[in-house]
Image (cartoon, grey):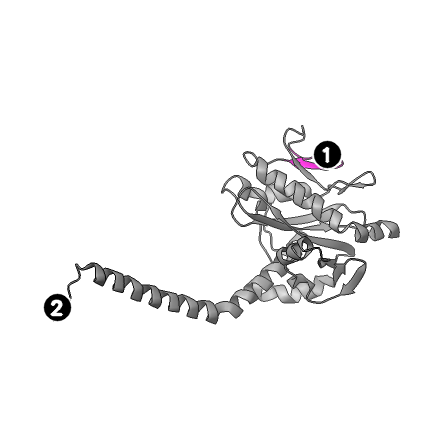
Amino acid sequence: MAVNTDKNSYTVIFAAVMVVIVGSLLAFFASSLSEKIKENERLEKQQNILYAMGVNENEDEGSVNFVSTDRVAGEFQKYITEQLVIEGDQITKDDNAYLIDLKKQETVAKAGKTRKLPLFIGEKDGSKYYIIPMRGKGLWDAIWGFVALDNNLVVQGVYFDHKGETPGLGANIKQRYFMDDFIGESILDGTEYAGIAVAKGNNDPTNEIKNDNEVDALAGATITGNGLSAMIKESVNLYKSYLESIRAKN
C-alpha cells in the first residue's frame, strides 16, 4: 500500500521519528566521547598555564603556539613545581588544583561559602613564577586567562581567551600583540593592588611605559577591555593575602 506523504500526520510522525533517531545518536556520541573531551580540556588547561609562564612553541613575534599535546603533560610536570589551593586562611598542596572549575567556585562564593582558589608555582631558567587563573565577563560571554607574576609581582606573561567575543574586535584579547603588552607591568600601584587596566587614550600606544598599570586598548572592543580590566583587578584582590606573603619575603 502506497504511503500518502502529503498528509499532515505523515509529516508529524516523520519529524518525531527523526528527532528520536538524531537525539539518540547525539546522546550516544556525547557519552562515548565524554572522557576524550575531559582529557582535551585537561591538556588545554596545562597548555594555557605553561604559555603564561613562557613555555610554548612560538616561532615568531606574532605566533601563539602551545606546547604540543603529546608533550604537555611532561612539560607541565617539569615546569610546574607546586599547585596550591587557597581556601580562606588554609593553603594546601594539590597536584590536581588545575582542574578546579572557577565558574563553580564563583557559585560557591555567591552562596556565602568560601571558594577554592587554585594557584600554580613554576620555575624556569632559575626564575620563579606565580600563575593566577582568572575568569570574568566580556561583551557577549565569559572571558578567562592566566597571569604569571615574578617575586616582585611584575607580569612575566599572560594568556587570555574568550567564549564568544566579536571576531576582529574583542576576540583579539588572545592575539600575541595584545597579550605581550602586559609583560613588564606591575599589578601594584605603590602599595595598592591596582591590577592592570586596558585603557583608551593612555598616550602610550606602544606600551613602553611599564609603571602606569595600563596597556593600550583594543580598537572597537571597549566593553571587552573593561571586562578584562575588572577580571584582573578582582582576581588579584582574591589572591591578595598570598601575594602579600610573597612581598614579605622580598
Task: Give above or below for 78 relative to 109.
Answer: below
Question: Where is mark 1, residue-wise?
Answer: 209
Earlier sequence position, callout 2 versus callout 1:
2
At label 1, the amino acid type is Ile
Q: Provide residue 230's location: percent of width, then percent of height.
A: 66, 42
Q: Nearer the viewer, residue 44 or 66?
A: 44
- Horizontal placement of 238 versus 137: left or right? right
Secondary structure under badge 2? loop
Please report the residue visible at 15 percent of the width from the left and 67 percent of the height from the top. 3
Residue at (21%, 58%) from the top-left corner?
Answer: 8
Q: Can the viewer see residue 20?
A: yes
* Type of amino acid under label 2: Ala
How many callouts does the rendering have?
2
Does the rendering let one see residue 62? no
Q: Quadrant of the N terminus?
A: bottom left
The segment highlighted magenta reads 206-216
Q: Which mark is residue 113?
A: none
Q: 108 or 46, which lies in front?
A: 108
The residue under the point 83% across, 40% down is: 191
Residue position marked by numbered label 2 in the rendering = 2
Q: Could you say where residue 153 lies in the image, as x and y percent from the top left?
A: 78, 47
What residue lies at 57% left-to-right and 63% top-to-bottom? 69
Dominant SS of magenta comes to loop
